[in-house]
Image (cartoon, helix red, strand yellow):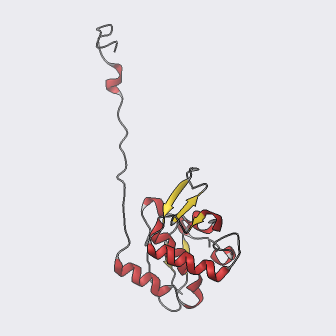
Amino acid sequence: MAFDNELIDSNPMRRVRLLKESPSRERFITAKEEKKLFAQLTGGRDHIRSVVTIALNTGMWRGEILGLQWEHVNFLARTIFIARSKTGMTRTIPMNDIVFKELTALKQEVGPKEFVFSKVARFQKMKGDRGTWQIAPSSRHCEIDPLSNQQHEDLNVRPLAS
């Protein structure tokens, strides 16, 4: 403004360098990766199948899924209400058919519990690099990062070598 009105000879802001933005990364799980992932979620790891199914179909963070209460699941409106997300905001997530069926089956299975995943101890976060969940396979090494976009850096399911 002062420069435009000829009150100063040069614009001092011209010397300020703009910060470069890091390129955003968007990644989606492929059908092949999803098949490999669910092949790992059997037997002793079957209990995490519902968590992964909900994560893949809603974009919810791990803490949102494990803290989900039945009172926030609206089967009539087919929505999930997140009272406090990782960003501190509330949001409402629509349920697709897969999530609706999964939550309906879980509701019948667990009965009158407060939390959708009442056995949260079974879903304990194991310490590892980048805070990922680690699932040890029976006899082979396989790395699957189905949710490695920026929003889901904290919920990469990565089987470890045995």
Query: Residue drawn at (32%, 18%), measured in percent from left and top?
Result: 11
User: Residue 74: percent from the left, percent from the top?
Assistant: 57, 65
Relative to residue 117, is residue 9 depicted above or below? Answer: above
Query: Residue drawn at (57%, 81%), measured in percent from left and top?
Result: 105
Q: Is residue 58 left or right of residue 2?
A: right
The N terminus lies in quadrant = top left
Relative to residue 134, is residue 70 depicted above or below? Answer: above
The C terminus lies in quadrant = bottom right
Residue 16 lies in quadrant: top left
Relative to residue 135, is residue 88 depicted above or below? Answer: above
Q: Nearer the viewer, residue 10 or 87?
A: 87
Query: Residue drawn at (57%, 58%), measured in percent from left and top?
Result: 82
User: Residue 24: percent from the left, percent from the top?
Assistant: 36, 54
Residue 141 appears in the picture as rendered: no
Residue 149 lies in quadrant: bottom left
Q: Is residue 8 left or right of residue 94?
A: left
Q: Nearer the viewer, residue 50 or 38?
A: 50
Residue furthest top in the image: 7
Residue 17 appears in the picture as rendered: yes
User: Residue 6: percent from the left, percent from the top?
Assistant: 28, 8
Query: Residue drawn at (45%, 87%), measured in percent from left and top?
Result: 39
Q: Is residue 155 left or right of residue 63?
A: left
